[in-house]
Image (tube, grey):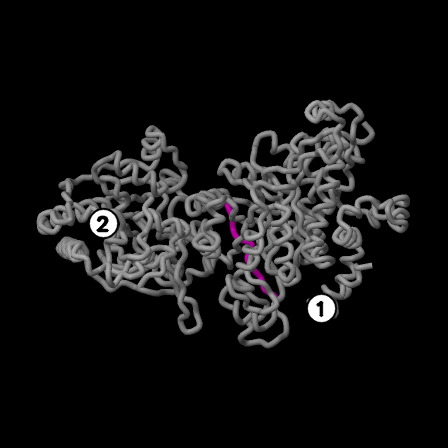
Amino acid sequence: MKTSSIISLLLRLFRKPSALQSFRKFVQQYPVEELVSKATKGRQAIFPLSELDEFGKAILGAPIYLEAPLRYDTLEKILIVPPLYTPLRLKKMEDLMREPLFTDVETTCTIGGFSSSLPVAVASMGSTPVYNKISLAVSKASAKIGIPIGIGENVATVWGYSKRVKPSQPCFKERIMAYLDNLRDGFGGVFIQQSVEDAYDELWNRVYSDPDITPYIYEGKVAFEVKLGQGAKPGLGGETFVERETALRLSEKYSFDADPKTTNKQMYERHSAPGTYTPEILRSMIRLLHNNYPRAKIWIKFGPYRDLADVAALCDEEKVDAFWVDGKEGGTGLSPVTALKDLGLPLLAVLGKISRLKQRVDMDFICSGRIIDGGDAVKVLCFGAFAGIGRPVVVAAYANGGDGVEKYFEALKTEIQLLTSAVGKYRLQDLGLEDVAAVDRQLALDLGIRSVYD
Amino acid sequence: MIKPPVEELEKYYKTIRAPKMRLILSVQAEASRAVRGWLDSNGFLELLPPIIGPVTDPGIRGAKQATIDYYGKEYKVMSSAILYKQMLATALDKIYFFSPNIRLEPIESAQTGRHLVEFVQIDIEEADVDYKAAMATAEQLLSHTVNHVAEKMKKELDQLGRTLPRFRTPFRKITHAEAVEILKSYGEPVNPHAEIPWPQEEKLSKIIDEPFFIIDYPRGARGFYDKEDPARPGILKDFDLMYPEGYGEAASGAEREYEYSKVLARLRESGENPAKYGWYLDMLREGIRPTSGFGIGVERLTRYLCGLKAVWEARPYPKVAGVYSP
């Protein structure tokens, strides 16, 4: 089993004794095994009947049930419900002049102005060392597959713009070029965040005037992503731990739990501000972006805030290209436990709001938050959003490098095709609320979908 | 779009020896004298410009600021000295300086013929006046300068093949919204919430073939220091002054936002942490006078006076985005 080797790899990155306990919990509560299996076996992992131990699991349904009831509803409470009568399959048969198969499902689409080979985008992951270390493998793999990818905040500020400040950690420019230089023809695009602290160094201006990136900006492959929030900690800023050397270097730009100049400890808590918004500030900010970077696309990264509908309507009016919403299950990078537990709307609530919004706005939505497999992705598509993927690519990359990421996406594609074809559809945009049902009547009512018992 | 002559720029020590350059730079020198003469006789005090400071004007249409290491702290090379102009006008009423600025412009700006990375602005600021007064100053100053140079440098301009029209005040004023409508009627739709893109600005400057102001830009199209009209939320009390004949922008100015809380909210639009603006916010918090002012690009003025294709002909050692020249 490769799981143990990943844990030891991850552990090497951390020096605190409590890390072991955290990772044990992570492995217990997150389907690491499933992801490792996909990262190593790719599509084979989807068909568990090929191996006896997996066969046992499929029969017993071990990973299907939750160990403890969650305090909020999750995608687990929704099922994809195929009909027998499938007029769109008939139509597809007319086009093909044969019975359609799941492989006939077209997964190519346009997300936030970028063309993508799958209805998914890789979430903006930032400067956190665990991710940054494997970021080049993820960038290259995502480029080869042809799906959009984000570069999260603080990367340039913490790890350098074009030169590494630490030999083992790739800098910003390496991350973006690893993606752009390997991009599958006609596909993909990169969206770049700028935190309040990155703004100090004018990251976006720097990108926009960088001669190496300019040709890609001309091709429409670059977006700037305004980060308004993050899944597990809406209303809070970025938090991370840095070593003294880094803390000293960044002392002008960030605030720390202790002044690294006058105190001496191994690790410092680095806080960054969540940013202050009003409708006027947000509107002007988007207009300023269109004004200053006319060739860049504008993406918004939103947290699970209760005023989602108002903010999304404003962003649609201001013609942003994509609106990404993390459910509270997503964007977990270094979030305080209390926030993980109690802050923000769960993904399912976000999806309910989006399916209603989709009736009046035509902006692209992307949703994330513990989206792991094709089933999760298809459910999200049924509510009118694309799927945002974060942690699975990290696990896949640690398990099997860039190859692991490619295999993971290969498996994801097949699962999406299987489930879409099962409801008799061959184009992703045909998926809709009629294709899902809730296992709970009240939930069905709240989400405007059917109950499985109807 | 014009391609910059890379070889001529790289070997600039040869380029500057061309007889044409002597003519152009003489016109430039005379224009500077005319500007100083008019401003001095109208009560403006010439000061020395700042070159570096802890902060400068935040990004202008995607241009990056240049940074230097100032005894372990980051300092910025002025991309515009606007924050200092507010400081100075509060103390000294009517001021101006010839301010060298650096803006690391996006690569595509190399082909507009109107952008240089290093350039000089004549920066003017006056306390206790509104933007209409600033426009009156701008039109009188520009008319004086153009008409003076047309007369005094007639011989040089003839050799350059340039005939200048006579400038008469007051200049025509159109609102940004009207400019958008005019462009639309000429089949050039532009974003009504942004500054007018360079090619369309050039077109407008050909359509309205006289010097004119575009006033009242929408909030979000300009920096945080352009004052929002309290009577018309979303509209700024600001202006661009345009040359005729397709030469585009001559000057850019505004009535300034000077109240602490308003500046703070506007600063958020650029996504920055206001803390970065330390001394400036201290100054606003303690109170400054309302001011209005504008900046005239010296190279663009020279380009217009001499009828040149591009600004890189309008100064010695021009720096064009992405070209490595002396």
Res A32 visible: yes
Q: Which residues are magenta?
A: A269-278
B202 lies above or below A51: above
Residue in the image at 51% along x and 48% along y: A224
- What is the secondary structure assignment of the residue under circle 1? helix
Compared across the picture, whether B10 is left or right of A271 comes to left
Residue A244 disc label: none
Residue B303 disc label: 2
When asked about the image quadrant of residue A61, the answer is: top right
When asked about the image quadrant of residue A96, the answer is: top right
| Tag in front: 2 or 1 | 2
- What is the secondary structure assignment of the residue under circle 2? helix
**Residue pointed to by mark 1:** A12
Compared across the picture, whether B258 is left or right of A1 comes to left
Compared across the picture, whether B295 is left or right of A308 comes to left
Q: Count the labels in the image.
A: 2
Check residue B26 for magenta coloring: no
B164 lies above or below B53: above
Percent across and percent down for residue B247 are 25, 43
Percent across and percent down for residue B277 are 42, 60
Amino acid type of disc 2? Arg
Q: Main secondary structure of the magenta part?
A: loop
Percent across and percent down for residue A391 are 69, 53
Res B42 visible: no
In contact (CB < 8 Å): disc 2 and disc 1: no
